[in-house]
Amino acid sequence: MNSLTFQPLVPVFDANIGVGHRHDRIAPFTDSSQLLEEMSRHGVAKALVYHVQGETRGVLKANETLFSWVENQPSLYPQWMITPSIDCLKQLEQLHSENQVSSVRLSNTIECKLPFVEWLYNDLLVWLSEKKIPLWISLADTSPVEIMETLSHFPDLVSVLVGAHYSHSPLIRPFLQRLPNSYIELSRFESLGKVTELKTEFGTKRFIYGSFYPRYAMGPTLFFVHQLELSQSELESFCARNLENVLRMETLI
């Protein structure tokens, strides 16, 4: 039987990988070497990783545990989970003083019952804005209404909206229009025509490849991105360069 194989045509930096076990979900890999093996299988050179336990509880501990995943692993970049607490902000300030913060990720506000509203997250979002640290927010785990209303109070804050589903299609254009420092991560956005349409309107720089692995498989979205009508330069931007620019790091290309 013939097997279907696919390898990306450009360097790839995955913007959305969760590591570790959750209290209610066992990960399919147990250490960074197994993750790197899966990345290699799909032609992914680098990944931005967060600890999944921080999605719902134990943000501080999840961030501490993340060190063991990224230590001595130059292909893995840590992304710290956040929740609206003084202790979380203190932890971030310490990490930032050690030059270890390139981005942060909002916890699952729906499951945690901590609505993403300005009066609750103000101190944290002010600090992120001042330090020019981008914020990842999952559309699968946070109210779109709260995202729009809260981020509107922080126009300088860069945000990456991850996990947009085809059901979110009517929301993406208003997000990109009203939040000019926002980007769309493509792990669940499966409409080729819609992405092409949005790229024509807003340009290539507003879109970022991510897999949302292991919540979803690593390969399908990467294959999907390669089916878009993109030039070589645009494909490089989707797959790595846009993320590198958001993180303000050296390019893979």
Image (cartoon, grey):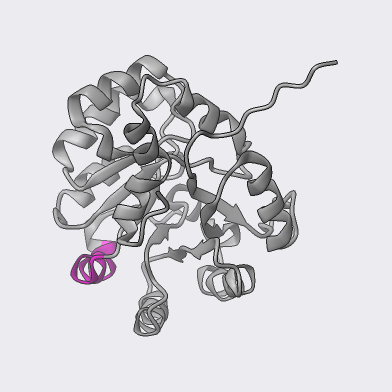
Q: Indicate whether 159 appears above or below 77.
A: above
In what quadrant of the picture does the N terminus appear? top right
As drawn, the residue found furthest toward the right would be 1
Q: Position of residue 245 (x, y in %)?
A: 29, 53
Q: Which residues are magenta?
A: 120-132
Q: Is residue 25 left or right of residue 186?
A: right
The foreground one among 76 and 87 is 76
- Residue 192 sits in which quadrant? top left
Q: Position of residue 80 (x, y in %)?
A: 46, 66
The foreground one among 101 and 64 is 101
The foreground one among 94 and 143 is 94
Residue positioned 54% across, 34% down in the render: 8
Taken as a whole, is the magenta stretch helix, strand or loop?
Answer: helix
- Residue 89 sits in which quadrant? bottom left
Q: Position of residue 4 (x, y in %)?
A: 71, 21
Residue positioned 60% across, 61% down in the render: 53
Check residue 67 for magenta coloring: no
Count all numbered tags in the image, as a single digit: 0
Q: Position of residue 238 (x, y in %)?
A: 37, 37
Q: Is residue 236 left or right of residue 55?
A: left
- Residue 203 sits in which quadrant? top left
